[in-house]
Each structure stands twice: as structure tokens, then as C-alpha cells.
Image (cartoon, rainbow, N blue to C red):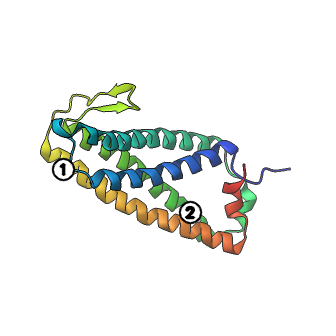
Amino acid sequence: MQKQGYSSSAVIMHWLLAVSIFFLFISSWWMLALPLPSDALTYREFPFQLHKNLGLTLLVLLALLLYVRFRHRPAPEATQAMRPWMRMLAIVDHVILYGLITAICLSGYLSSAYSGWDTELWWLVEIPNWGYEENEELNMFYSDVHLWTCWALLGVVAAHISGALYHAFRNDGVVRRMLRL
């Protein structure tokens, strides 16, 4: 009997990625509602560090997901219910999602590196700025890239969820592949 869905590890990675993205957006709104941390406002450093930690974790999760996705191919039967243009659209959607997530994480790191603020991975290991010196111009550039790619990601995630809802209403088996554990 042929497997009907993604591997359990791919399903878990997918949902961990989704939850991480959700919490990154929540932490960013919390973070942006506060003034920038300073020596006088050190308690406000927590949301910034939390956001950076979630972003770095997201990048690791994405790498693991890509490894799992290429190692365990989905069952072909579920995609046979899809028309060729739908399969192509799903591939394009995933490539854009993965590309945007990578761009967001890297631009966030570079913005932080050029801001002069240190990053500690879950308050255990300091992530070096790799020789980047504080540079307000580059900090703002990467901050803008980070912001606009985040907005683009929201749009692509909305399209992704819309596609999932479409297939759920069609009951064509596509959504079942990602819900199977």
C-alpha cells in the first residue's frame, strides 16, 4: 500500500514553521510598539531578542523542512486530483514562501548586525556580527528589506491558506496529506 501523505516529520516541520511565523508577526508588533532599547531602557531588549531568536529558529526549521521535503517525496495519488496549472501554482507558491522566509531571516540578521546590537541565541550563545560595524544606512536598508518581505510573506501565506481552503472544500485529498500524522 502506498503512503497517502507527507512523512510525519514533514507534517511536524510544516506546522512548526507556521506557528513560528505566527509568533514572529506577533512579536514584531509587540516589539515595534516599544521604543528602541537603550542603556536606560534595558528591559525593552527582551522583545527584540525574542524576535531575533524566533527568526533564527525559523531559519533552522526551514532548512530542516527543506531537507525532509526533498528526502521524503509526497505520495503521487493526491496530486493527481490537481490540474497541471494547480500543481505548478503550488510549486511556485512554495518556492516563493521559502525564498521570502530566507530573505526575511537574512535581512533581519543583517539589520541587527548593522545596528550594533548583539544577538544571543536563546540567551545561551552569542551570534557574532561577522565583522559588521554599526552602520545606520545599511541597518535601515536591511530593515526596509525585512519589512517589505514580511508584508509580501503575509500575502503569499494568505494565498497558501486560500489554496488549502479551496482543496478542503473540494475534498480532493490534498489537505489530508498535510494533516496526516
Q: Residue at x 42, y 42 (%)?
A: 54
Nearest the camera: 70 or 163?
A: 163
Please tell me whether residue 74 is drawn above or below residue 174 in the rendered image. above
| Count of numbered labels shown in the rendering | 2
Splitting the image into 4 quarters, where does residue 122 fall?
top left
Tell me if residue 51 can be seen.
yes
- Tell me: 103 left or right of 9: left
Q: Earlier in the sequence, mark 1 or mark 2?
A: 2
Q: Residue 159, position in %: x, y?
A: 50, 68
Q: Residue at x 65, y 42 (%)?
A: 9
Q: Secondary structure at mark 2?
A: helix
Binning the other alpha carbons within 10 Å of mark 1 as few (below 14), some (14 to 19) or many (20 upward) gives some
Note whether residue 79 is visible. no
Image quarter for residue 151? Answer: bottom left
**In the depicted view, which residue is nearer to us: 181 or 53?**
53
> Amino acid type of disc 1?
Met
Residue located 55% across and 70% down the image: 162
149 versus 162 height, above or below: above
C-alpha gap between disc 1 and disc 2: 33 Å
Across and down, in percent, residue 180 comes to 72, 53
Which residue is pictured at 50% across the width and 61% down the height? 93
Q: Label 1's element?
A: helix
Q: Amino acid at mark 2?
A: Ala
Q: Which mark is on residue 140?
A: 1
State the residue in front, 127 or 149. 127
- The x, y position of residue 72, in whole percent, is 66, 43
Q: Which residue is mark 2?
A: 90
Instruction: Check the image and name the residue furthest to the right.
Output: 1
